[in-house]
Structure formats: structure tokens, C-alpha cells
Amino acid sequence: MSERIVVDPITRIEGHLRIEAQMDGNKIDKAYSSGTMVRGIETIMKGRDPRDAWAFAQRICGVCTLVHGLASIRSVENALDYKIPKNADLIRNLMSGAQYIHDHVMHFYHLHALDWVDVVSALSADPKATSELAQSLSNYPKSSPGYFADMKKKLKGFVESGQLGIFAKAYWGHPAYKLPPEANLMAVSHYLEALSWQRDVARLHTIFGGKNPHPNFVVGGVPCAIDLNSDSAINMKKLSQVQDIINQMKMFVDQVYVPDTLAIAGFYKDWTTRGEGLGNFLTFGDFPSNGMDDVSGFMIPPGAILNRDLSTIHDVDMNAADEIKEYISHSWYDYENGGKEAGLHPYDGETNLNYTGPKPPYDHLDVDQSYSWLKSPRWKGNAMEVGPLARVLMLYATGHDQTKELVNMTLNKLDVPVEALFSTLGRTAARTLETKIFADQMQGWYDDLIINIKAGETKTFNEVLWEPSSWPKSAKGVGFMEAPRGGLAHYIVIEDETIKNYQAVVPSTWNAGPRDGNGQPGAYEAALEDNHTLHDVKQPVEILRTIHSFDPCLACAVHLTDPDGEEIIKVKVK
Amino acid sequence: MSEIEFLNWVRGPGFQIAVIIFIAGIIIRFAEILMLGRKANLAEPKGSEMSGGLHTIVSRSFPDKSTFQRSTFTVVAGYLFHIGLFVTIFLFAPHILMFKDIFGFGWPSLPTPVVDAMAVVTIIALLAVLAHRMSDTVLKFITTKEDYLVWMLTILPLVTGYMAFHRIGMTAPTLLALHILSVELLLVVFPFTKLMHGFTFALSRWYNGAISGYRGVQS
Amino acid sequence: MSSSSVVQFNIQVSADLTQNVKPLLHEIKHALDNLIETGQTTIIDLRSIPLAPGEEDHILKTLGLGEVQAKLDALGLSEIIETQYAGVWVVTHYNDENHIISRFIEITTMPEILSSQTEDIMAAYSRLAITLQDDQEKN
Amino acid sequence: MTNDFKKKKSQKEQTFGDVMRSQGVSRRSFLKFCAATASMMAMSPAMIPKIAHALENARRPSVIWLSFQECTGCTESLTRAHTATIESLIFDHISLDYHHTLQAAAGHAAEEAREAAMEENYGKYLLVVDGSIPMGNPGYSTIAGISNYDMLMETAKGAAAIIAVGTCATYGGIPHANPNPTGAVSVNDLIKDKPIINVPGCPPIPVVITGVLTHFLTFGTIPELDHLGRPKVFYGQSIHDRCYRRPFYDKGLFAETFDDEGAKKGWCLYKLGCKGPTTYNACATTKWNNGTSWPIEAGHPCLGCSEPDFWDGGGFYKSLSMPTENITQTAIYTAAGAVAAGVAIGAMNKSKKNSAIAAHDKTTIDDLEK
């Protein structure tokens, strides 16, 4: 029997992910992705005030710290047909855009970079040559030989202390690391720069939402009032802070993130031919200019692309009973209606915990049976990939000028064909490119907000449907958005002013979910099965590269809900 | 049980239990009183029962001169703590929010410092009333255990409320929970003790006035 | 000399602000008195006071600028400013990224951090000694 | 080899003061650092000399950070720390030997790093935990095939102290919220024989996390704790008591909705459900993200996230004085029931009265004399 290798924990991600890979010699034959943690937030939300839902939903994930809160309030607003003021939409766009920029940069440097960058190799870099390299790539001011000499000195002192801390036991020196020492030193320096930069730009959330992580939201608008004459509201001082942060974002993305991605990618062009995944892509659409009801005003259009065919964009209906369905053939759940084989639309979704995996501690999962806490969502029966690559392809396919320009520039620079997009590296590059698009777009939303305020329009909250007594006896709605990791939809059923059912269909379930009943793998699994040869099965850095290219975020992906309000889960609660 | 769990309990199930006993108690007591009925008055009415009744409800809220002279202390202290209770219960902003949550409507509140001062006055008045009761031989003689209990349960919400507002002695969640619990105790015993006069006073005054009114005399 | 004749505050505290500004200024006044009477210094950590938005600016504006404004370059910038009230200093420490990491009001004749430190003086002495020695050897 | 090992060892024995000096940091810089540290740890500036002395001799402790049923918000929060930045923490203050989200190694290598750190620093390392532990079924959360419970117990054994970071690790948090589907519990529900510092919050304020870590680094001890195991310096006073909007509460001036006149002027958020009066945390003084703002300053009522069971507090927009259950409905149902009961009891009383009246005729003087 061929070897089965296990990578658990997959580190530098959010949440608990396990990959098992069935090897054929040194090549991955079959890959299995398993989410190994469940909390049951959807069950916990039942019976509560829908206006509170965002706070619970937000705690689904502290990395995508904003998106579940936003999707949640949108679901309530959609259910109640609750209109929000223009300013609230703009502030939400600014906050969501800031989330992209913050999250993508952090992912690239702190979660992904160490798959490509060898920290130990950086110690043999020449600071002067590093400086020359950096200056040839961009005009970022922190690029003097002295700066890199200091960085090298700091790193050296750290390594020589003998306590490597977070850098201990990594695969340093692995032949798959191909950057010259100077590029490694530059990247490690930017790893640290980005840590400090992200702290600053996260403050945009704090200004509008009071804190980050987990900024505050409110159904019907945003909690922060606007009053230029008050110390205690959004005033000129706070707005100029926002402008400074936007400038800081743009500067770092333009001068550090984009050049670094292109420079590093140049050394890893072999990664444009592997890790493709499904070839099916899905977006729900987001960033309204005219409210969530006007899809034509969305910056990111909704749609589905099948089999890499960019010429046909299929329409997506969030509410259609036969489009989005979740399956549990290989998940540790049970359906009351339909057993293991059925697929249920989120409104009718149900999830009853049924752990049938091996008793911990265990070595391997039984992948013929259930092997994950994630479900397998499918769109019209197709496994789909969501996320930056899906969005960039959608923008590219629908003729978004800036996207076309950026994609073509990247392909030219790397000298690779358009098919290179469908790969591990393509996914990572798409994330960088969309960050650039968002960084530019931030200014537009900010300017619109200023124009509104100048015109005397300061409303940020619509109180008309705030009191639950003004609601219909029952209502249901979907709150969807494009989260940094992909299309996200929260489904809510409201009855008697409380939550009757709640279901989140999240990016990581689309990407990281297990096989369905037809044996159709999820996006992670498919990507790993595409042309992955491991140099050393004991140091599977190749697996990390492809998995990290999706920016895994697992906490969100585990479900637990039940549509009938019956308590099916029989767990001894301490 | 953590203090927040305690607070959640008194704001949730605890309050519910108290309200159920309170409302059920009041209604049953009223039903008992009303259904016992009055003997039909066979005499020719010489005036209006209604106007007489309404008149006494109002007039007996003010002491006549001789009562005032005879027991100035009782009247003054009694008025003080009754008015104080009214102000602290019904004109304090957080309390109004509670009523708003239950009844669906609210009313304007008094500034917090005014309510705070009133609470102190009320507590002092209640203490004085107790001192008076215990020092006056006759009063002391006719005082039952229930009277002490009722006094205790009346002053407790005031004291705990004052402590909760000023955060004296314990952590804020505990103080708030104790305050709410003390109110719940008061609600529970309310219908079954002399506290019931808070509801029946109008009925009894009306009854007295109505008799006089029927007879055509000034009550 | 009584303290009240030394310090004259003429500030307008907006009714809408918390009452943090006024007590703080009173505290400074008492600390000055203390400095005069007993020579005892006082340090107030501005980050330990719950200030309303805008209040910190208000305090700094009220204290104003005096005769001394010093800058340190030690693990990032530090600003040491004597306010218009002699003996009242505002010490602001920044980190390498120019973020304020702490801000103190010190009531003293001179903030400690301005003085040369014994350890640094000793290190300086040996450095200078080595330099001179090298110089001698070269010649 | 032996020499190398010795050399390594001696470097590990280096104190913080040694490290600073070897990096050419002047005494003046060190003093400035101590002043900032005192401020971060919410200590009186009078403590600065003591902190300087303690830091001189402090050693860089090994830290193992375990993540269980969590959302990574606590780690994200840690990375937002401005004072004692995450970089300085990782490079200068502590040796972060195991941390899922940040460490380079993965899979077996990651687990090896944890085991190595435990072995080398047995009895001395600091264990940080975020997330709750599911007791309903070991399969509800596993890492490397090991259940959370087993991993916690194994790692806790050799820890000098445990820091439970975030409301999930300290009180069970959101997984523990009603009906607690996975049987989630907190660290101190399971571990009784180790000093545990609770740093609650959803997430905790970054400087509170780094402040507690720095306190341990500086003094080698745990700070003074309150009755819920929280460091008193950060959780000693309620949000309400230190809130800049408190004067409006005292005056009875409240925001009624999110963008009315009161909201714009910064009036008290009590009526919008603020849990500040029952919440102990440092938001009002340290604020968030380097003093940028905090929830109440941004116009949203405090959720009360550093208190146990705050998720089950009856609604984030219900004022503390409001009952958490639907009392209107209770009252209506009760009234309906009571009317029926009252009528029944009244009827019983009436028949009693009537029979008493009927019996009255038969009463004789003899009866009265009985």
C-alpha cells in the first residue's frame, strides 16, 4: 500500500485544518481535507434577537473579523426589507474594503510568505545588494543598505539566541526554496514591516466600529453618528485619520505588496502549472453603490464560471431551491430528511452532529466514510471555487478595465499564458491584484462620503424598523457578500421577533469541504491532486503552498443548525 | 453560579416568577374582594355613589387638619416615603425603560441626582417610621411580624438600589442583581400582605365615599 | 510663597466634557505645591485617565508651551516639553514608528530621562578612553 | 557539539538587560522602555525604577500558545498591540515556541516544536490558551488527531502558569452559550492545580494581553487577580465608572437611537443597551488600537464581552434594567389564568360566605360562649 501522509495542524491559517494525502510514490494521488473543530454557533443563535445576530455571527471568525457581522445584518435587512442610509453603505464598503486590504497583506506576509521565503537563507544576504534589489523593484523609502543591515543584524541576533520561537522547526534549507538570499532578506524585512503596517490600517475599523478585531455593527445602518461639530461623533479629525489610513494602505500595496508578489512569483513560475483545482468559480457579488437590491451597482458582479469558460457567465440565484445545496456524504452530520445522500438548500438546511470519526488520539481518518466537520456545498451540483481568483476572473470576464490591465501586466511580466491563472501561483497573484483594485477603490468611497456630508447628508442609521414590534410575524432573508476568502451567504428565518433558523454558507466550506456523494472533491482536494510531487514526504512544503494559496480559514466552515426548532443534538452539557 | 449568571437569572426566570405571582395574586385578591359582594342598599339614594366615591379617593389623600395636628410625624414621614417611593420607582430613567419594555410606552424621567436625593430622603423617612413604631408603646404593641417583614421588604429595594447606583461594597453585577432580587421579593409578597393597600386603597376609599354619597352626605 | 500665587489657571472647561480636565489641573496644582514645599516630584500617566475624545488635546493646549523643548532619540523619538507653568513638564514617548507609546505629566525641576545616566557615562568614558588609546597607538 | 550546546545554553540564560545592552541600547533608552512598560501594565509611574530593576534580570520565557474552540480573534488582537509590539514580543520578550497561526512549521514539525519546548523548559514555560474545550465528544475538536482536552492536560503539566486569553478560554465564551451544543468548558473548569490568569474579552484588548505577558516576564509572577481570576490593574473598574459619557448618565441625558441628537453629542448609551455598568474592563482608559477609539466612543453600546455568560445576558440592545424575558406576554397569560383562578376562588369564598350566613341563624349564645 502506498503511503498516506498527514499534515495536521496546517499552521499559519485560521482554525483547525488537517490534510491527508494518499501518495503514489512521491506524487499526491488523492487528497483529503478535514476541518477538525466544531462549535455550533448556528444552534446557539436560535431563539435570540435577530438584531443581536451579527455579534454571534461575527465570532464565527476573528480573522475575517468583519465579514460575518456584515453578512448577518444584511440577512436581517433583507428579511425585513430594511433600507439603510447611503452613508451607511459607504461606511460599510470602506470597512469591508479595509478588511480585504488588511487581510490579504497579512495573509501574504504572515501566513503564506514563509512557504516561499527562507528565513535562514536571509542571514547570508548582502545588505547592499538587497538594497539594490529593493530599489529596482519599487520606490518604497525603507530600502537603504543601512536599513537592511539593521534587519539582518536583528535577525542574526535572534537566530543566535538559540530560541527560534515561531521560526523553529520549519523546513528551512528545503530545495523547494528558490529565492536568492537578498530576496529572502527583503521579504523577511517586509514581513516585519507588514506587521507594523497592519496595526495602523486596522484602525479604520476602530474609527467606525470602535475596535478591531470584531468591530461593531448595527442592523439598519452603522453605529457611528456623523457630526462635524462634535468631539464624540465622526468629525473632520476622524475623517482625516481615515484619509491617512487610506493613503497608507495604497502606499504599502503599491510599493511593497504588489512588487514583492511579482518579484517572488518570478522565481516560482513552475507553480503556474499546478494546483489548479476545480476550474469552476463562483461569486455572489458585493460593494453596492446603490443599495443591496441593485445588483447592477455592485463593484464585484455575481456569477458562476464553469470549466474555465470565461465567455459564459451563469446567473446565480441565492434563493433558488435547486442552485445552492449542501451535502454531508463525508461530513460528521446527519440529515433527518433524506439521510446522508440528500442535498439541502440553506433555508431548509439541517445539521445534526454525528461524530463517527476515529476516537482521538488517532493517526488516520477513514476517508471512505465521513471525515470532516465541513459540509460540501454545491452549485447546481458542481463543486465551485470561491475567493480572489474567482473574483478576478469574474471582473476579467465582465470586462473590468483595471482588472484586465493588471492581469495582463502580471502575465506579461512573468511571461506566462493566461492559463497560468488557474494555479497555486495564479491564486496568490489574484489576491494581490484585487488588493490593488480595492486600495484604489477606497478613495472613491471616501470621496463619496465626504461629498454627502458636505451636502448636509449625515444620516447613518434608519430607525424605522428598529423595534421588533414593527416586524412581520415571520420573514426570511439572505445576507450575502464577497468576503476576502470568497462568496459568503447568511440565511435567516425570523419568527415572532426571534431567530427561528440561521445558516451560514461560507467560503471555506466551498473551498475546503470534503468530497460529495458523487466523489467530486472540494477545491483544496482537487488542487492538491493536480500535479503535486513532493520532494520529501517528511517536509511537505508543497502541500502548504497550495493550501495556503487559498488562505484557509476554518472556524467559519463548521455548521450546526436544525430547521424545526427541535433539539436534536443530545450532548451532555456540563 | 457566577455573578453574571445570577444577574441573568434575576432578570430572566426570577423576574418572570415574581411577575406571575404578583399578577396572579393581585387578580385573585381582587376577585375575592369583588365577588364577596355588598349587601344591596335598599334605601332611596340621596346622592351619587360615583361622585362621593371619587371625591373620597381624592380627599382622603390629604390629611385633615386635626389628623395632621394629632400625628404630625406619622403624616409627614408617611407622605415623604410614599412620595419618595413613587419618585424613585416611577421617575428614574432605568426604571422607566423597564416599564417601557413591559407596557410598550414610557414617560419622561427626573434628573438622576434628584432621584438619588429622593432615595436618601425615603430611606431616612422609612427608618424614622420604624424608630417611631418601636419607640411608641402602643404602636409597638400592635405591630405584628408581618409589619416588620413588610417594612424590611419595602426598604430593601431602596437600600440595594442606592448601593447599586453608587457601587457600594460589592461588584456592580452583584449589587444590581441583589437590587432586582429585592424588588422580586417585594412583588412576591405584595398581594398577600398589607402592601396590597397599594391597589385596594382606591377601592376602600371609594367604598366609604360611595356610602356617604348614596346617603347624600359629605364624606 | 503660597502655591495659589504661583499657579493661576484660567481655563474654560466645556460642560459637555467629562470632569477629567479640571481635577487633573487641580492635581497638577497640588503637585506643584508639593514640589515647592517638600521637593517631592509627581508623575501622572495620562493613559491611566479615561479621557473623552478631544480632552487630551484640551489639557495640552491649556498647559501650553514654556521655555524648554527637548528631543530624545532613544528607541524612537521622545519629546520633553516644559509647559508655560514652570515645573510642569509633558513627556511624550514615541516608538520607532512614531506612535505615542506613553505620555506623562511630570511635576519636577527636570525629568529624570533628560539627565545623563551613570551607566551611559561610564560607557562613554571607556569609549573615549579607547578612542584616545587608538589614536595614541596610531601616532 | 557539547561546546555548541553550552554556548546556546549560556545565551538562553541571558537576561533581558544583557540582550538590550548587546543590542547597544543605552540606559536612557532602557528607562524610556520601562516607562512605556509601566504605562502599558497600568502601573503607577512610581513603579518605573522597580520595573527597570526587574527587567534588568528578567529572562526570555518560553511560551506555548494553544488554540482550541476559537475564532483566532484573540491572536489577531495580539498582533494589533502597539506597545510591546508583536515583533518586539516575538524577538525580544518571549520565545513563542508554538502558535498555530504564526509559526512557520506545520504538521509533525509543529508538534515537535511544542514537545521540544515542553521538554527543554519543563516547569518554566508559560502556557497561553485561547478557545474553549469541548467535553461533549473528543472528536468535536482535534489537533494532530489529539483531542483538545488531552493536549491541554499534557501541555499544562509542565507549565509555570497558564494565561487563559479571551472569553472562550476564561469562561467558555460563545461555544458555552446556551444551549452549549458541544459541552464547551473553560480552562479553569479543567485545571485546578496551576496558577491561571484570566484575560477575558472578545477579544481582549491587545495591550492587556501583552501587559500580562510583560508582567510575567518582568516580575516572574502573576499579577494581583480579582475574584474571577482577572488582573486587577486592567479589570479593577467598570466601563461605566470610567466612561467619558458617565456625566450624561448622571444628568439623565441619553441617546435614544444611533444617530439622534444625543448620539451625535456623545450622550449616555444606557438606553441602547449598554452593559458598561456591569462590565469590568480597561476599554475606557486604554481604548482600542493605540488609543484610536473604543466601542462606546464609536457610538455602540458595550456588549459586556469581558464578563462570564455575556452572550446570554438577554439581548445587546436591552438595557440592564429591562427584564430579559418577554414579561408582557407572561403578564397577559398570567392575568388570563389568574382571572379564571380568581373567579373560582371568589366563587368558593362566596359560597363559604353564603353557607356562613346560612349557618349564622343557628348560632346561639352557647356557641359564642364556647
Image (cartoon, coloured by chain):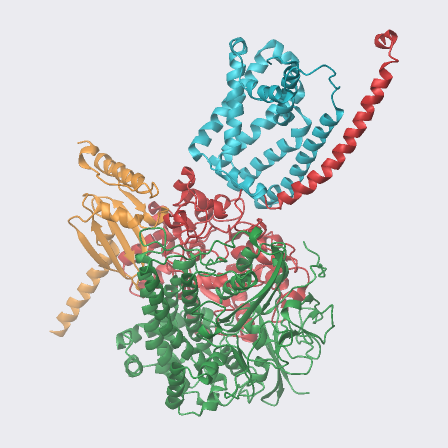
Chain colours: A green, B cyan, C orange, D red
Who's the residue at 46% across and 67% down the image?
Answer: A291
Nearer the observer, D267 or D240 = D267
Residue D231, percent across and down? 47, 49
Residue closer to the observer: D54 or A443: A443
Residue A48 appears left or right of A421: right
Which quadrant of the structure image shows residue C15? Answer: top left
Q: Quadrant of the N terminus of chain A?
A: bottom right
Residue at position x 79%, y 25% in the image: D350
Could one spot residue A245 in this view of the protein? yes
Residue C7 in the image: above or below residue A359: above
> How many marks do you count on the picture?
0
Which residue is depicted at the point 34% across and 60% down? A453
Position in image of residue A346 (x %, y %): 63, 69
Question: Which residue is depicted at the point 30% across and 72% down?
Answer: A150
Residue A27 shown left or right of residue A329 in the figure: left
The x and y percentages for residue B50 are 63, 22
Where in the figure is residue C116, as x and y percent of width and height? 21, 54
Q: Is residue D269 above or below residue B139?
A: below
- Relative to D334, D242 lies left or right: left
The answer to whether residue A9 of the structure is visible from this angle is no
Q: Quadrant of residue A39?
A: bottom right
Choose top left, top right, bottom left or bottom right for residue A455.
bottom left
**Is C44 placed left or right of A89 in the picture?**
left
Query: Residue pushed farthest left?
Result: C139
